[in-house]
Amino acid sequence: MATHWTLGGDASDPHRLAAFWAQALGYLPEEGYDDPDGASIVDPVGRGPAISFLRVPEVKTTKNRVHIDIRVAGEPPWDPAERERLVKAKVAELVAAGATEIRTQRYDDQFGHVVMLDPEGNEFCVA
């Protein structure tokens, strides 16, 4: 049996970051977690890990070494046009929620993924 685990991250505004990632992933605030300097979100069906954010005084200064990739198109095989449409729709939703689109990555002239920044400048991809 797998071990339950939580992905933890630092944040200047943990509640704002938790709200962004809850929307991005379809998660919910963790019931009973009430901390002004921290926030936690959970998968409503209990399959994915919890994600928590703790307030820290320093700002992000370098590239993050671990990040979340959002896979909206599911698993292969994909219809390339439909996959690109799903990714671009999610990117637009995330931009409206406070993310920044950085670039579209292509491989052999085929659509690959979109690199983005969350509201605190943490890199992630939408594929």
Image (cartoon, rainbow, N blue to C red):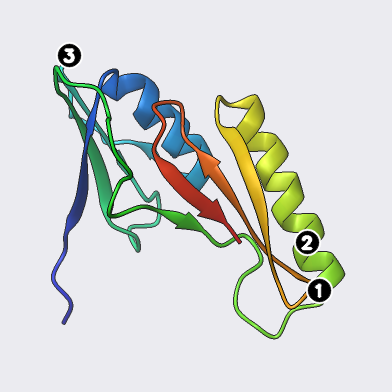
Q: Distance between the residues labelled 2 and 1?
A: 6 Å
Q: Distance between the residues labelled 3 and 1?
A: 44 Å
Residue under pointer 1:
80
- Between tags 3 and 1, which lies in front? 1
Q: Are marks 3 and 1 in contact (CB under 8 Å)?
A: no
Identify the residue at the far right of this view.
Answer: 81
| Label number found at residue 84 | 2
| Crowd around label 1: few <14 · some 14–19 · many ≥20 (10 Å) | some
Task: Tell me which residue sits at (55%, 42%) in the image.
Answer: 116
Tell me: 95 left or right of 58.
right
N-terminal label among 3 and 1: 3
Query: Residue 30 appears in which quarter of the rendering?
Result: top left
Task: Tell me which residue sits at (61%, 62%) in the image.
Answer: 127
| 49 relative to 41, above or below | below
Tell me: 96 left or right of 115.
right
Q: Do the residues labelled 2 and 1 touch (CB within 8 Å)?
A: yes
**Image location (x, y in percent) of residue 64:** 30, 46
**Image location (x, y in percent) of residue 81:** 86, 68
| Crowd around label 2: few <14 · some 14–19 · many ≥20 (10 Å) | many
Tag 1's secondary structure? Answer: helix
Tell me: 29 left or right of 104.
left
Which of these two is toward me, 119 or 19? Answer: 119
The amino acid pointed to by label 3 is Pro
N-terminal label among 3 and 2: 3
